[in-house]
Amino acid sequence: MFLPPKQVFSVNCNISTSSFRVKLVRLGHPARLLPQVLESALDAQVLRGDNSALANDIRKEMKTLSGKLLKAKDKNTRREIQKELRALSKEERKRQQLAVTDVIKNADVVLTTLTGAFSHKLDNTSFDLVIIDEAAQALEIACWMALLKGSRCILAGDHLQLPPTIQSVEAENKGLGRTLFERLADLYGDEIMSMLTVQYRMHELIMNWSSKELYNSKIKAHPCVAAHMLYDLEDVERSSSTEPTLLLIDIAGCDMEEKKDEEDSTLNEGEAEVAMAHAKRLVQSGVQASDIGIITPYAAQVVLLKMLKSNDDKLKGLEISTVDGFQGREKEAIIISMVRSNSKKEVGFLSDRRRMNVAVTRARRQCCLVCDTDTVTSNGFLKRLVEYFEEHGEYLSGSEYLNV
């Protein structure tokens, strides 16, 4: 299946068909959960259980006994109190474990991360169905931690987006970078795969390039998003900045060559200023800064863009990240800074189809590509991307953004 991502959904088989209300429990530390889902956290539900209340009563009794122990002088009395404390401590742990077991047993769906599925809280617990979301970005060994909890499984993800990040080259060469999702897809293909073909994020012009280039033109836009525009948003003016769905800003011939930083990551100062200038134009037209994202494949460019952003309070909500860091996310407007601009026409990992697929498809209503077309079109895949933007979008020179 091809879906978005991030948690494991372990499903008990006692879901009531007479009611749409599903009992959910989320494993994980409450501090890592969003406020709106705290009520479904395991810890919160345990506190509301009868066994937890009994455990709390036992702790109060233990506290009282501990006070008596401090005052007791007779050895036999102290020995009896200590014996009783040990018994109460054992009973308190038992009640606390029962409280956890009760919540999980009564849940229809248990949500956790892959490693969280290996928690002792799920010991001796099995599920009718295990669903792994974002499976195409998960290490196979991590998937098995969850899969062994159930008799059936669904892997949901997209192997044409970014794979797991493997730090060790040796480990990747020996197969760690190959996901279970990819392996099963290659082994069984259409026998076990089901492709979701309707998307609910992008304007169809943004989607069509990805659909044609990577998904055999099978992806379609739902009518609710197929024609939505930036200027349809509340308080956003219709302007030359908000009208295009696709915008290509070409820095070729603008004397904006790439550089290397101390850690050998690539950056482009001129292109960063152009990307930031377009973001400012969008904000001036009424687009909320928080609805705009600037993404780039290079960490050094992220640092540079964030420095430029810090100089303008109106851009406070603007989000800047690497392409990898933005997977699974979306914004109303996305500005892609491709960075590479050199006489050798080297594009580096811009040629990674999966990375550019993620970058373009983060956008809902506008996708702006900032690049040196002379450099990036040396690669056939990127050339087709540029040509698509030229054919279906607006073309501007980076020089039009200078001195903004």
Image (cartoon, rainbow, N blue to C red):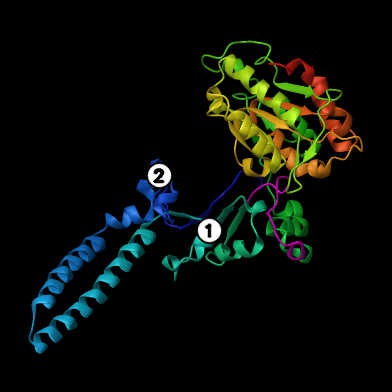
Instruction: Of the two numbered discs 2 and 1 on the same chain, state the one appearing first in sequence.
Output: 2
At 60% from the left edge and 15% from the top edge, which residue is drawn?
231
The image shows residue 9, relative to residue 289, as above or below, that is below
Query: Does 237 sit left or right of 34 as displayed?
Result: right
- Is residue 165 shown in magenta? yes
Q: Name the residue under label 2.
A: 37
Q: Residues within 10 Å of mark 1 (few under 14, many from 20)?
A: some
Secondary structure of the residue carrying tag 1 is strand
Asked whether, in this view, residue 38 is left or right of residue 74, the answer is right
Q: Looking at the image, is 234 positioned above or below residue 215?
A: above
At horizontal 58% and vertical 27% (from top left) the residue drawn is 311
Percent x, y of residue 236: 56, 14
Q: Main secondary structure of the magenta part?
A: loop
Quarter of the view holding residue 87 = bottom left
Q: What residue type is labelled 1?
A: Leu
Q: In which quarter of the image is residue 196?
A: top right
Residue 352, image x, y percentages: 79, 44
Task: Inspect this view and state whether residue 197 appears.
Answer: no
- Amino acid type, callout 2: Val
Residue ranking furthest to the bottom: 76
State which region is magenta: 156-172
Above/below status of 281 relative to 134: above
Residue 152, x across and y down, in percent: 57, 61
Residue where numbered disc 1 is placed: 129
For residue 240, say whether it is visible.
yes
Position of the C terminus, as image quadrant, is top right
Determine contact: label 2, label 1, CB under 8 Å: no
Question: Which marked residue is nearer to the observer: mark 2 or mark 1?
Answer: 2
Q: Does the magenta stretch include residue 268?
A: no
